[in-house]
Image (spheres, rainbow, N blue to C red):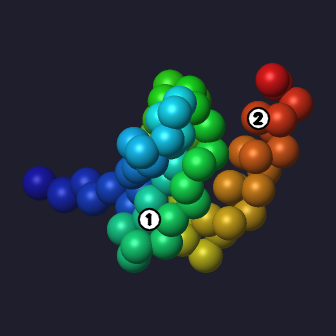
Amino acid sequence: MKETRLHFEVCAEEGEVPVMFGVVCRDGTRAPRLSSDYTEVERLVRALNRNRLSPVHFWDVIEDFRHSWGEIQ
């Protein structure tokens, strides 16, 4: 059976009000404070893992997310 390893996970800045969520890469690279909406960040993480995003492209995707999130709000 093939092991599925997640490269990306949701991380939380719990000392903040409201709690802010970000993304952490398995190599330790972090993009904190992306949104206070857990669902949106979790959806991003699922897409990154489902599409097997190379960590090389991590910051490009994060910047795209930041720009699109700003347009939605």
Residue 41 in sight: no
- Label 1 neighbourhood size at 10 Å, few (<14), some (14-19), many (20+)? some
Q: Which residue is mark 1?
A: 25
**Residue 49: % across, % down:** 45, 50
- Nearest the eye: 38 or 9: 38
On screen, residue 35 versus residue 63, left or right, reads left
The CA span between labels 2 and 1 is 20 Å
Q: Secondary structure at mark 1?
A: strand
**Residue 57: % across, % down:** 65, 68
- The residue sitting at 44% across, 65% down in the picture is 25
Q: Which residue is mark 2?
A: 69
Image label count: 2
On screen, residue 51 versus residue 2, left or right, reads right
Amino acid found under the numbered disc labelled 2: Trp
- Residue 60, compared with residue 66, is above or below; it is below
Residue 26 in sight: yes
Residue lying farthest right?
71
Amino acid found under the numbered disc labelled 1: Cys
**Residue 17: % across, % down:** 52, 33
Quarter holding residue 26 = bottom left
- The residue sitting at 76% across, 46% down in the picture is 66
| Quadrant where the image shows the N terminus | bottom left
